[in-house]
Image: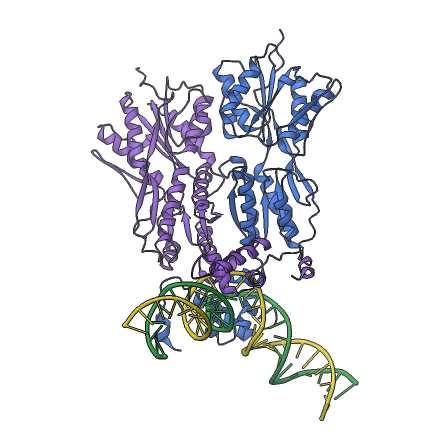
Chain colours: A blue, B purple, C yellow, D green
DNA sequence: CTCTGTTGTGAGATCGTTCTCATATGACTG
DNA sequence: CAGTCATATGAGAACGATCTCACAACAGAG
C-alpha cells in the first residue's frame, strides 16, 4: 500500500530481482522460486499473488544467477571456421532454429581453421558454462582439447567431420556415396577421363596410393577425403584407370592457386572431358576458368560440382550439382546435442555418426562425352 | 606434498576453482584474485606461487561467476533477421572479429523480421547480462523495447537502420548518395526511362508523392526508402519525369512476387531502358528474368544493382553494382558498441549516425541507351 | 490420543567470483 | 619514540537464483 516508494526507480540497470517479487507478494524467495519454477507446493492464493507481483514488476529471472546455481546456461556454442561461409551460416541458421525451440541461445566463434583458435574457443565456451558445443574440428587428428571437454562432461557434436574414437557424435553428409553416384553419372554419359578437383587441408595433404587394380587415399574421414574415395571407388568399379594427373588438391588457404590448378588440368595433353569439383570454391573457379577460356560446357567439357549455391542456376549452362543441405545438417547437429542434454546426466556419448542424405540436381552442365 | 589426494579427480564437470588455486598456493582467495586480476599488491614470491598453482591446475576463471559479481559478461548480442543471409553473416563476421579482439563472445538471435521475436530477443539478451546489443531493428517505428533496453543502461547499436530520437547509435551505408551516383551513371549513359525495383517492409509500404516539380517518399530512414529517395533525387535533379509505373516495391516476405514485378516492368508499353535494383534479391530476380527472356544486357536493357554477391562476376555480362561492405558495417557497429562500453559508465548514447561508404563497381551490365 | 502423511512455507546454504575493508608488518620521518 | 606511509595479506560480504531442509498445520488412521 506504500505508493511513494514505488515511484522511485533507479534508471540504470536495475531489473527487479526475485527478492523484489517476494517482498511485493509478501512471501519468501523460496516460495516465489517454487511458483515460478513450477515445482513443490504452493497454495492457489499465494500462487496468484506471486504471479501478479512478478508480472507487475516485469520480473525476468537473471539467467546468469540461474546458471551459477543450476549449472545449466541454456546456451550452446558453435565453433566453425568462418561464419560468413554460406555452409556455416546456413548450418548456423539450422542450429539457431532448433535452439530457439529449446529456449537456448547460441554463441558463435570463428576459428579460421586455426587449431590454436579452436582450442581457445573450447576453453572459453567451457568457461561460459555452455550446455554443449557444436564444432567443425579443424583437424580430425589433433583433437585432445575436444576429448578433454567431453571427459569433463561437456556434450560435443561434430559437424561435417567425424572424429573416430573420440566418443563424439557427428553429423556428416554421405560424401563418399554421393560422389560415387555423381561420378557414375558422368561415366554413364560416356566419360572416361574425369578430372577431380578438391580443396585440401594444408596440414594434412591427402596421400594417394595408386596401384594397378586398386587406388586408395589414406587418412581419416573428412569431406574432402571421402569425396576422393568416392571418386576412386567409382572409377575403379567401372574399370577405368586412375591417372594421378587427373586428381588435383588445392590447399584450402591458397585461394589464388585454384584457378591455376584448373588451368593445369585443362591444359593436360589428353584433356579430361569431364570435371568433378568436390567443393563450392573449386566449382566456382572451374566455372570461371571454363567461361573465360570460352570452353563450351557441356559441349567440350562437362562440369559437375559438390554443394549448391545461388549462382549455379543464374549462369548458363546451369550447373549440375550434388547438394548437401547445410541447414539440415545444422538442425541435425543441434537435435543430436539436445538429445544428449535431455538424458539428465549426459549419457556417455556413443560416437554416433549421423549421415545426412544428399541430392543430385541434374541441370545443364553435364553432357555426353564428345566423340573425337 | 600429499600426492595421494591429487590422483583422485572427479571426471565429470569439475573445473578447478579459485579456492583450489588458493589452497595449492597456500594463500587466500583474495590474493589469488589480486594476482590473476593484476591489481592491488602481491609479493613476488606469492605471485609466482599463485601463477604456478593456477597453471598446474589448468585453472580458468568461471565467466559466469565473474559476471555474477562484476556485471560484465564479455558477451554481446547480435539480433538480425536471418543469419543465413549473406549481408548478416558477413556483418556477423565483422562483429566477431572485433569481439575476439576485445575478448568478447557473440550471441546471435534471428528474428525473421518478426517484431515479437525481436522483443523477446532483447529480453533474453538482457537476462543473459550481455554487455551490449547490435541490432537491425525490424521496425524503425515500433522500437519501445529498444528504448527500454537503452534506458536500463544497455548499450545498443543499430545496424543498417537508423532510429531517429531513440538515442541509439547507428551504422548505415550512404544509401541515398550511392543511389544518386548510380542513377546518375545511368543518366550519363543516356537513359531516360529508368526503372526502380526494391523490396519493401510489408508493415510499412512506402508512400510516394509525385508532383510536377518534386517527388518524395514519406517515412523514416531505412535502406529501401533512402534508396528510393536517391532515385527520386537523381531523376528530379536531371529534370527527368518520375513515372509511377517505373517504381516497384515488392513485399520482402513475398519472394514469389519478385519475378512477376520484374516482368510487369519489362512489359510496360514504353519499356525502361535501364533498371536499378535496390537490393540483392531483386538484382538476382531481374537478372534471371532478363536472361530467361533473352533480353540483351546491356544491349536492350541496362542493369545496375545494389549489393555485390559472388555470382555477379560469374554471369555474362558481369553485373555492375554498388557495393556496401557488410563486413565493414559489422566491424563498425562492434567498434561503436565497444566504444560505448569503454567509457566506464555507458555514457548517454548520443544517437550518432555513422555512415559507411559504398563503392561503385562498373562492370558490363550498363551500356548506352539504345537509340530507337 | 498419538502417529503418519500431505500440504504449505521460510531460513539459509550454495554456486565461484570480485572487491571492500580490516589488519599486520616494516620503513621512514619528525 | 610516536606517527605516517607503503606493502602485503586475509576475512567475509556481496551478486541472484535454486534447492535442501526444517518446521507448521491439519487431516485421517490406528
Quadrant that contains the C terminus of chain A: top right
- Determine whether A70 is above or below A182 in the image: below
Looking at the image, which is closer to me, A300 or A207?
A: A207
Q: Seen in the image, is A294 located left or right of residue B275?
A: right
Relative to B164, say whether B207 is above or below.
above
Task: Classify residue A184 by image quadrant.
Answer: top right
Q: Which residue ends up furthest to the left in the rendered image?
A: B213
Total labels: the figure holds 0
Locate residue B93 relative to residue B183 in the image: left or right. Answer: right
Say which quadrant the N terminus of chain A sits in. bottom left
The residue depicted at 24 percent of the width and 27 percent of the height is: B240
Q: Is residue B128 visible?
A: no
Q: Is residue A28 among the parts visible in the rendering?
A: yes
**Quarter of the view holding residue A210:** top right
User: Residue A44: horizontal and vertical position, in percent?
Assistant: 56, 73
Residue A195, image x and y in percent? 61, 19
For the residue pair B215 and A81, the one nearer the viewer reads as A81
Q: Residue furthest top?
A: A372
Residue at x 46%, y 27% (from the top left corner): B311
Residue C24 in picture, x, y percent from top left: 46, 73
| Residue shown at 56% from the left, 14% from the top | A266
**Residue at image location 65% in from the left, 15% down from the top:** A191
Amino acid at each position: 500500500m506504500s505508493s511513494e516508494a514505488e515511484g522511485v526507480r533507479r534508471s540504470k540497470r536495475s531489473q527487479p530481482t526475485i527478492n523484489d517479487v517476494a517482498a511485493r507478494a509478501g512471501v519468501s524467495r523460496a516460495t516465489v522460486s517454487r511458483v515460478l519454477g513450477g515445482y513443490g507446493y504452493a497454495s492457489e492464493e499465494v500462487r496468484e499473488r506471486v504471479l501478479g507481483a512478478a508480472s507487475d514488476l516485469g520480473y525476468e529471472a537473471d539467467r546468469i544467477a540461474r546458471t551459477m546455481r543450476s549449472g545449466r546456461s541454456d546456451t550452446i556454442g558453435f565453433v566453425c571456421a568462418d561464419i560468413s561461409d554460406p555452409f556455416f551460416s546456413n548450418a548456423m541458421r539450422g542450429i539457431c532454429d532448433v535452439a530457439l525451440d529449446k529456449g537456448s541461445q547460441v554463441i558463435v566463434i570463428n576459428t579460421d581453421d586455426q587449431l590454436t583458435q579452436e582450442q581457445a574457443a573450447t576453453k572459453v565456451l567451457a568457461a561460459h558454462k555452455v550446455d554443449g558445443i557444436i564444432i567443425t574440428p579443424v583437424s580430425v587428428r589433433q583433437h585432445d582439447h575436444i576429448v578433454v571437454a567431453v571427459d569433463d562432461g561437456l556434450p560435443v557434436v561434430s559437424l561435417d567431420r567425424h572424429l573416430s574414437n573420440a566418443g563424439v557424435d557427428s553429423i556428416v553428409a554421405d560424401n563418399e556415396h554421393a560422389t560415387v553416384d555423381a561420378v557414375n553419372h558422368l561415366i554413364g554419359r560416356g566419360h572416361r577421363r574425369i578430372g577431380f578437383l578438391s580443396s585440401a587441408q594444408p596440414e594434412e595433404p591427402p596421400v594417394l596410393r595408386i596401384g594397378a587394380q586398386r587406388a586408395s587415399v589414406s587418412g581419416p574421414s573428412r569431406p574432402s577425403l571421402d569425396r576422393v574415395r568416392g571418386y576412386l571407388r567409382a572409377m575403379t568399379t567401372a574399370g577405368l584407370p586412375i591417372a594421378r594427373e587427373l586428381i588435383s588438391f588445392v590447399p584450402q588457404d591458397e585461394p589464388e592457386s585454384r584457378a591455376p590448378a584448373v588451368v593445369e588440368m585443362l591444359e593436360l595433353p589428353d584433356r579430361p572431358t569431364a570435371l568433378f569439383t568436390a567443393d563450392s570454391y573449386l566449382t566456382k573457379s572451374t566455372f570461371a576458368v571454363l567461361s573465360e577460356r570460352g570452353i563450351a560446357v557441356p559441349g567440350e567439357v562437362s562440369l559437375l560440382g559438390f554443394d549448391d549455391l545461388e549462382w549455379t542456376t543464374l549462369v548458363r549452362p546451369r550447373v549440375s550439382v550434388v547438394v548437401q543441405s547445410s541447414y539440415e545438417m545444422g538442425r541435425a547437429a543441434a537435435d543430436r546435442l539436445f538429445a544428449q542434454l535431455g538424458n539428465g546426466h549426459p549419457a556417455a556419448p556413443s560416437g554416433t555418426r549421423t549421415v545426412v542424405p544428399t541430392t543430385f540436381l541434374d541441370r545443364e552442365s553435364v553432357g555426353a562425352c564428345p566423340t573425337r
